[in-house]
């Protein structure tokens, strides 16, 4: 599992759950509460978005704008990478 969840949101859910539930907790209830928490950072989604944001450069030219080679380079602009990482993969 590579998702991070909000601790404050989870604590709020536990608080609400304990106020309305019986004093007997079942593992299934706890597991459900945890699994239902919103993701605040999804590593797999960040990696996927970074991979999809790659751009390709396929032509190499000399100073006179003559094509010297066809080269495939992959890169991502730093501003775009920072934006993806800051969003945490969550759209």
Image (cartoon, grey):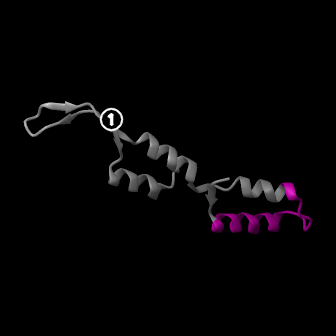
The residue to which callout 1 is attached is 72
Please name the residue shown 81% across and 67% down the image: 18
Residue 91 appears anywhere in the view: no
Percent from the top left, x then y, of residue 76? 36, 47
On screen, 56 above or below 78? above
Percent from the top left, x then y, of residue 61? 16, 36
Residue most extreme to the front: 68
Percent from the top left, x then y, of residue 52? 44, 40
Q: Is residue 41 magenta?
A: no
Residue 68 appears anywhere in the view: yes
The one nearer the camera, 3 or 12, is 3
On screen, 68 above or below 41? above
Q: In the picture provided, is 79 more to the left or to the right than 25? A: left
Q: Is residue 14 magenta?
A: yes
Please name the residue shown 32% across and 49% down the image: 77
Residue most extreme to the right: 24
Question: Residue 38 sits in which quadrant?
Answer: bottom right
Residue most extreme to the left: 64
Question: Residue 30 sits in which quadrant?
Answer: bottom right
Crowd rating for badge 1 (residues with CA inside 10 Å; few <14, some 14–19, many 20+) = few
Q: Please state the extent of the stretch shown in magenta in the rendering.
A: 7-28
Q: In the picture provided, is 82 more to the left or to the right than 7? A: left
Percent from the top left, x then y, of residue 17? 79, 63
Question: Residue 70 sits in which quadrant?
Answer: top left
Please name the residue shown 72% across and 53% down the image: 35
Please name the residue shown 45% across and 43% down the image: 51
């Amino acid at each position: 599992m590579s998702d991070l969840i909000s601790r404050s949101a989870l604590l709020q859910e536990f608080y609400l759950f304990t106020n309305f539930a019986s004093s007997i907790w079942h593992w299934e209830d706890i597991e459900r509460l945890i699994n239902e928490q919103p993701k605040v950072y999804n590593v797999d989604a960040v990696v996927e978005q970074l991979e999809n944001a790659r751009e390709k450069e396929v032509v190499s030219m000399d100073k006179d704008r003559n094509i010297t080679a066809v080269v495939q380079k992959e890169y991502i602009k730093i501003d775009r990478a920072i934006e993806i990482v800051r969003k945490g993969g969550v759209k």
